[in-house]
Image (spheres, coloured by chain):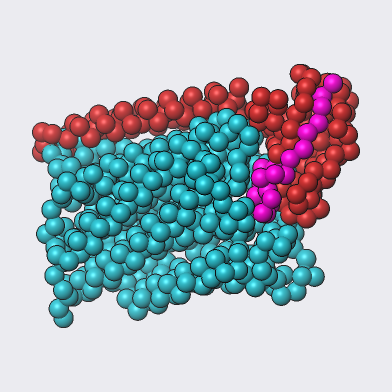
Amino acid sequence: MDALYERRVAGISLGIGAITIVLFGTTIFFGVIARMSQGGFITLRPDVFYEFMTLHSVGVAGSLMTGITAMMWYSLRKHINLHMNLMQIMFGIIGAVVVSLLAATLLGFYGTGWTFLYPLPFKSAGAWDDWAAGLYLLLLLCVVAAMSLSWGDVVITAARKYTFSGAVGWKLIAGKDTPETTPPPVVLISVITSLCGLFSNIAGATVLILLLIHWADPGFYLDYLYIKNLIYYFGHILMNMAMYMAVAVVYELLPLYAKRPWKSNKIVAISWNAAFIAVSLAYLHHLLQDFPQPFAIQVIAVFGSYMAAFPATVVTVIGAMVLVYRSGIQWTVAPLYMFLGLMSWAIGGFWAVLDAGFNNAFHNTMFVPGHFHLYLLAGTSFIFVATLYNITEELGGCKDTFEDRLGLWAWFIGAYGVALTFLLSGVLGTPRRYAVQMPGKETWSTFGALFGWIVIFALILVIGRYLTRLQKVKPLRS
Amino acid sequence: MTQLFVGSAAMLGALIIMGIFWKVGTSSMPRDDDYKHVAEAGYAIRRRYFWGLLAVSVVLFIIGVIAFPYPKVMEAKIKGEPFVVKINSKQFQWDLSATEIPLGPVRFDVTSQDVNHGFGIYDGQGRLVTQSQSMPDYVNRLYVNFAKPGKYKIWCLEYCGVAHHIMTTEFEVK
């Protein structure tokens, strides 16, 4: 790849990184305010609480997804030449969507949570305007289209270079690989993850178009269970993809710090193909309390959830450990974020498997936000920040400071506190998504809000340090 | 009981994972340039871990399936004819065909008139006993074998709108 292309990619990634980390922090702020209300520090009106909850969940997921897509794109720059115009269009669309989303929630009072379970968007009991529901669905459809552009580009460009069966690792598995058709792990994982995303987007686009038709014509009948399946297939895969894209980045960057190679081989290819199947089946655990689902499907849901643990831990987590053990790695902030990010993924994933395996006891309790807050707030986002640190090290020669380390450990403590207070509250049966907690179950929310403020403190430090480090990056010259 | 067991497993598992990461992370020095040797040792551990994970997963999977709350499983467990309660949910209230329920097997036929709700039964100490979804056009048949008399509460366990958190009612088991 030519140096100018690489430099441009890095420049755009740094810019997207700056925008998305600020957006990420802002939408976390809404989450902390909502948690303060649950903990009794302040009193939000219920409609405002649910607005904030929606803004927080969609905002955090959207900003993290966009940010980590940019970081994946950055990590691919040495291997495949992606279309910069497409990427800029994608980020432009998502930027416009964010502004409109603010309008839908803050002006239109929209508040279904990210799940937009049919028919809730159209039956708000007077809480939000009809136009806000339509706008929200339309905006999500725009995000689906924008993300598809980017992921389609990854798949097509990689297939042109390595052939499709080479890019997804099938040649490695069949033993028919050649150096020309064997992609590095970052490409292999990015292609498989992008394929997951494209499948999920087909489901997402289908359900969003159906709901928009229903919005325009309320007489248009939709089957509730079918729509629920589509929504969770779409949402579950999308959130898992964010982590998988982050893991692709780790495969590329951690070896640079460990000064050891992490290459594609048959085991890595099998594991990521298995991950594709597992994540496609595991979404079904969201419907384990829907008894009309066929019994065999419910068994597959639990099977898929356990299966997801194998490729993640057997290959990636142990592979990372082998990479760093006796490697002489210097634990600067960037690799430390990555290593801790993998740890949070492993713990959060373990909790997710327990949730699926014993779902009747935990479904829609605080146990659920407990597990996903850990692997989003201390997993995916840690690897996102690690990449920002890596780019500024590489292009600006930046060195870590006390504030960098303070930011990392404050974030770590805050994120684990936030996740644990959710989780333990869920063990006691506390329902999630309550503007006011059940009597006697407020205590964990109080502690959760305090840990949330530690995360905010850490984010202010990290964003401040990132913007300072950015100034050291030399301007792009053609 | 399930919550306590799984919650303890969640904490124990988290501590073990953290311990392993701590051990590996603090064993990065000194550098061993014979990476092939390190990798072979790591992969030997990986093989053992794989079989261990498989064994634990199979056991947990079987326990999970046996504990499924679905009619297919529960009808085999429940002895005698269950007392049937029809549950109709709508924003933001529960309609029950009976609020006094006899001890022993009970079948709740749960459905909704508007949006998705979650039918969560809590005991007098605020512990979640069991749950199912409550969806329009579909009926969830939830079996419960009540062994203890007393007042039980129903709370909504699927976000259903602006008064979701106050969608509650109670019944008594005698």
Instruction: Identify which residue, B136 or A26, lies in the foreground.
Output: A26
- Where residue B102 appears, as percent x and y from the top left, is 86, 23
Chain letter, red: B
Q: Residue at x 31, y 37 (%)?
A: A318
- Where residue A400 appears, as percent x and y from the top left, is 15, 50
- Where residue A461 appears, as percent x and y from the top left, is 27, 52
Instruction: Identify which residue, A164 or A275, lies in the foreground.
Output: A275
Q: Can the viewer see residue A373?
A: yes
Q: Quadrant of the C terminus of chain A?
A: bottom left
Position of residue A313 relative to residue A280, above or below, is above
Q: Which residues are magenta?
A: B156-174
Position of residue A408 relative to residue A80, above or below, is above
Q: Is residue A261 left or right of residue A343?
A: left
Q: Colour of chain A?
A: cyan
Tell me, yes or no, whether the highlighted magenta stretch contains residue B158. Answer: yes
Position of residue A116 relative to residue B69, above or below, is below
